[in-house]
């Protein structure tokens, strides 16, 4: 009798385990998300790897090139760990443990914070070069740029720690492990609003002001020999803020229960859109080169010419401004 009862229990347990076992990704949305992340990973690792190789080893180090080199390193690190997100999507369950759950969150926000700080630094640096060329000629050194980059990475890492601390694993109603943020309701509201204000609106305002000042100064001094560096800076900034806009929109919508039905799909799409920013920068360097013909073998030369023109354009603006100021004396 006991053996019969034990056998029945084993069958019930086996049936229960089979019913709650995670199913692999099969629906259209799931497959498309996995493919999109895979494409972003391949292009991002390849493109940013090329930028790191060229800006780090092929050409002379300048203040401008180290800005973009640091930006490429941030995007490269992010793309390198995107396969973890693919596993999560395909398995429909977090199977990589608590440490990796915290790590992917830390890596995501490290990329986010470092990119924002670097874009603000690039904008302010460009504005200072145009507005105060004599001062920057003496004070704008490679060593100081490297110190600023180091500080920006330290600040970004410190800001990313809370995201990892609050990351946790739970079992959902389908008996599957979920990697999520263990915020209380008031904490979640504060985090979302603060991120939107301090990591989106304020940087956007600073960058916009710098762009307006640069445009006015360039027009007043007729320094239009090459405006490609300014176009690249503008394109990087626009691409970043457009790619992260859906993320903030859906996070703010999450605070209102009315939008609960559209949030799961919307947040997944927002994550993909935000991730595209990690591979778009190398494409901008290449596509904005002179006489781009769409040939893959020209990619290296286009990226390298972009960085070289950064140096030439900066020298040209400073020489024009200096000569203009001398004529006024």
Image: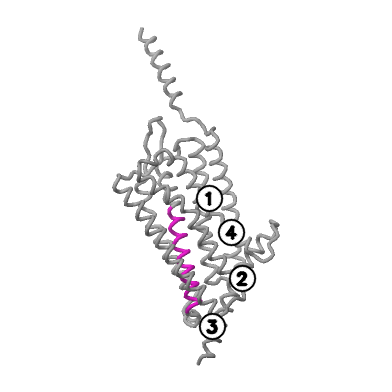
Disc 3, disc 2: CB below 8 Å? no
* First-in-chain label (1 vs 2): 1
* First-in-chain label (2 vs 4): 4
Mark closer to the observer (1, 2): 2
Number of residues whose C-alpha sits closer than 10 Å to that of mark 3, classed few (under 14), some (14–19) or many (20 or more): many
* First-in-chain label (4 vs 1): 1
> Percent from the top left, x then y, of residue 283?
60, 58
Mark closer to the observer (3, 4): 3
What residue sits 52% from the left and 44% below the top? 83
Which residue is label 2 attached to? 308
* First-in-chain label (3 vs 1): 1
Q: CA distance from mark 1 to mark 2?
A: 28 Å
Q: Is residue 148 above or below residue 199?
A: below
What label does residue 80 carry, if any? 1
Mark 2 element type: helix
Main secondary structure of the magenta stretch: helix
Q: Which residues are magenta?
A: 109-131
Q: Indicate whether residue 197 is drawn in magenta.
A: no
Q: Is residue 11 above or below residue 49?
A: above
* First-in-chain label (3 vs 4): 4
Q: CA distance from mark 3 to mark 4?
A: 31 Å
What label does residue 282 carry, if any? 4
Disc 2, disc 4: CB below 8 Å? no
Q: CA distance from mark 4 to mark 1?
A: 16 Å
Mark closer to the observer (3, 1): 3
Mark closer to the observer (4, 1): 4
Left or right of 284? Residue 253 is left
Which residue is label 3 attached to? 321
Q: CA distance from mark 3 to mark 2?
A: 20 Å
Q: Quadrant of the N terminus?
A: top left
């Amino acid at each position: 009798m006991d053996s019969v009862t034990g056998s029945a229990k084993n069958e019930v347990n086996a049936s229960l385990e089979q019913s709650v076992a995670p199913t692999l990704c099969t629906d259209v949305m799931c497959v498309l998300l996995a493919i999109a992340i895979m494409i972003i990973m391949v292009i991002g690792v390849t493109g940013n790897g090329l930028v790191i190789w060229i800006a780090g080893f092929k050409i002379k180090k300048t203040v401008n090139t180290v800005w973009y080199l640091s930006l490429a390193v941030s995007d490269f690190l992010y793309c390198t760990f995107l396969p973890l997100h693919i596993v999560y999507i395909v398995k429909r369950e977090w199977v990589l443990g608590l440490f990796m759950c915290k790590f992917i969150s830390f890596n995501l926000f490290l990329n986010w914070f470092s990119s924002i700080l670097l874009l603000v630094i690039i904008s302010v640096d460009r504005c200072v070069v145009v507005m105060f060329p004599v001062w920057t000629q003496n004070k704008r050194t490679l060593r100081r740029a490297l110190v600023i980059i180091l500080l920006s990475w330290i600040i970004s890492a410190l800001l990313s720690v809370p995201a990892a601390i609050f990351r946790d694993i739970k079992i959902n109603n389908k008996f599957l492990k979920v990697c999520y943020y263990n915020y209380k309701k008031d904490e979640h509201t504060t985090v979302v609003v603060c991120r939107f204000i301090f990591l989106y609106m304020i940087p956007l305002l600073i960058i916009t002001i710098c762009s307006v000042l640069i445009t006015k100064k360039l027009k007043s001094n007729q320094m239009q020999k090459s405006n490609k560096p300014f176009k690249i800076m503008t394109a990087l900034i626009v691409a970043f803020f457009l790619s992260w806009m859906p993320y903030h929109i859906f996070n703010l919508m999450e605070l209102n229960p009315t939008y609960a039905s559209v949030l799961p799909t919307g947040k997944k799409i927002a994550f993909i859109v935000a991730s595209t920013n990690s591979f778009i920068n190398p494409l901008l360097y290449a596509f904005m080169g002179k006489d781009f013909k769409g040939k893959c073998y020209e990619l290296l030369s286009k990226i390298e010419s972009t960085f070289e023109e950064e140096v030439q354009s900066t020298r040209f603006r400073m020489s024009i401004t200096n000569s203009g100021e001398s004529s006024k004396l």
